[in-house]
Amino acid sequence: MAKVPMISYDSATGTRIFRDTFLTLWRHRELVQLLVKRDITVRYKRSFLGLLWTLLNPLLTSLVLWIVFITVFSARLPDGTEFAPYLLAGVLLVTFFTQGFSQAADSIAQGAGILMKIYVPPQVFAFASAISNAVNFSFGLVALALVSFITGDGMSWMFLLTVIVMLCMLMYVTGLSLMVSILYIRYSDTRSIFAILISFMMYLSPVFYPKDILSETMLRVVNANPLTSYLDVFRHVFSNTGVATVGDWAYMSFSSALIFIIGIRVFANAWPRTAVML
Amino acid sequence: MKALIEVKAASVTYRIRHGASPTLKQTVIQSIKREKLDVEIQALKEVSFSVNQGEMLAVVGSNGAGKSTLLKLLARVLPPTSGQVIVRGSVAPMIELGAGFNGELTGRENVVLYGTLLGRKPKEVQSRVDSIAAWAGIDESIDLPLRTYSSGMVAKLAFAVATDVQSDVILVDEVLSIGDAEFQEKSKERMREFFQGDSAVILVTHDEKAVRDLASKAIWIDHGRVMEYGEVDKVLSAYLHG
């Protein structure tokens, strides 16, 4: 009979948070892969359109928004960029953020059935949820590329840098979710509070409006929102429908790294006292 | 003989709030009012024991004595609040089997996911799926979604996956009786093989006969404390008459 590889456990060792977290994640990388696959399979297995839905979903959402806002902004934004790719890019990235956050933050509470019986590092669930939303996002890029070509803006080789935006967003979503997942387990009312906070963040970023229409004060608020820097950079590199400054790049990288580090640390410290509440 | 499990003065303390699920609002109001509504529950108090290779330790005690908490401690699911827990080798937690099974996935996909959750390599489990399904007697439906299975079939499949490999440490919550008479005999046989191997086994049970037949030593826990620990006869008579 085959044997499971020898792993020893000693509750008294292990307080180097980052090394430990990444080491356990690396050891469970195949599990993360399977969980991502499960998330995607389960989401589309029973829908008639299957994987096609991943493309249709953001396209239809954008179409509705486009029809509504075209009366306000017309097909081209004040600075001359096409509105359709601008809008779809915003919808795709913000969906990655909001959906990724809501699923990843809840994934650990959802995994209680497993976590209370089998030893699995709980972070695995948050990482897997965030990654499966990154995969969804990359499916959506196909739709965005189509729209960019149809409207005539096209793309440049800069679009390869989208990988960096995706990675930063992945870290941002994971870090934020890890922190908030602790609150979700401890306090039942925090879910509704965060649903509101997240939609605040969404409306205070240029998802479906151009920044030109904002007043001086509002512009300051919107620019302080980290999401804005992600949107600016993404639009700039993917379809050249916006301007990204060095400041945007810096703010995006800095916020993702910071939130990621804080998230891992907060989670590792709080988990032992939170596990008993699952 | 090598000790595969060592528990040294391990305690587990829960802090639970009064009433139903706590809310942030409630917590903030309480801290402003300086009310203290947290209750400390000590589920385990300075528990110590060890289990060697090839030994089976039976855990007895009334409901709520802390047996489940003890299993969680050994399964690495809960960290001890104080003290130390050492587990050497792979752990097979035979506790409410089938955690993480998903109705939308096929039997095959579930087997691979469950096997991986239990710490095996997905590729290795993949190659074992057919023999696992055959042993559980559900080879025809292995590629159907799990929601089409009867609850008995699901339980058989979970048991077959969990016992597909011999682990160094086996945690058993009640001797399992799954499925029809024929399968029960088969599963008992497999458990017996498991128990006779080199593994260290923890058996939590209310079945006095099973303890006498199988265990090499026993521990009696009450209100989180160790009341008696050692020879099976000594512990059982203290538990039953004390």
Image (cartoon, coloured by chain):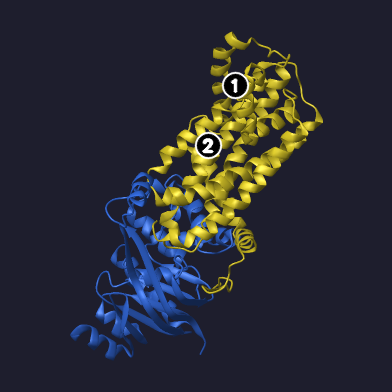
Residue to which mark 1 is pinned: A208
In front: mark 2 or mark 1? 1
Q: Quadrant of residue A278?
A: bottom left
Q: Residue at x 51, y 55 (%)?
A: B113
* x then y, percent, for residue B121: 59, 62
The colour one sees for chain A in the rendered image is yellow
Check disc 1 and give the amino acid type: Phe
Task: Indicate the secondary structure of the residue bearing disc 1.
Answer: loop
Instruction: Say the numbered circle drawn on residue A103.
Output: none
Check disc 2 and give the amino acid type: Gln
Camera-side residue of B213 and B224: B224
Residue A191 in the figure: left or right of residue A97: left
Camera-side residue of B198 and A19: A19
Tell me if I can see residue A37 in this picture: no
* x then y, percent, for residue B92: 46, 70
Residue A106 in the figure: left or right of residue B204: right
Q: Quadrant of residue B64?
A: bottom left
Camera-side residue of A254 and B181: A254
Chain letter of the residue carrying label 1 = A
Circle 2 crowding by C-alpha within 10 Å: few under 14, some 14–19, many from 20: some
Name the image quarter holding the C terminus of chain B: bottom left
CA–CA distance in space, label 2 to label 1: 17 Å
* x then y, percent, for residue A85: 67, 21
Task: Indicate the secondary structure of the residue bearing disc 2.
Answer: helix
Give the mark nearer the N terminus: 2 vs 1.
Answer: 2
Q: Residue at x 54, y 23 (%)?
A: A61
Chain for colour blue: B
Instruction: Say the numbered circle drawn on residue A99.
Output: 2
Residue B109 in the figure: left or right of residue A208: left
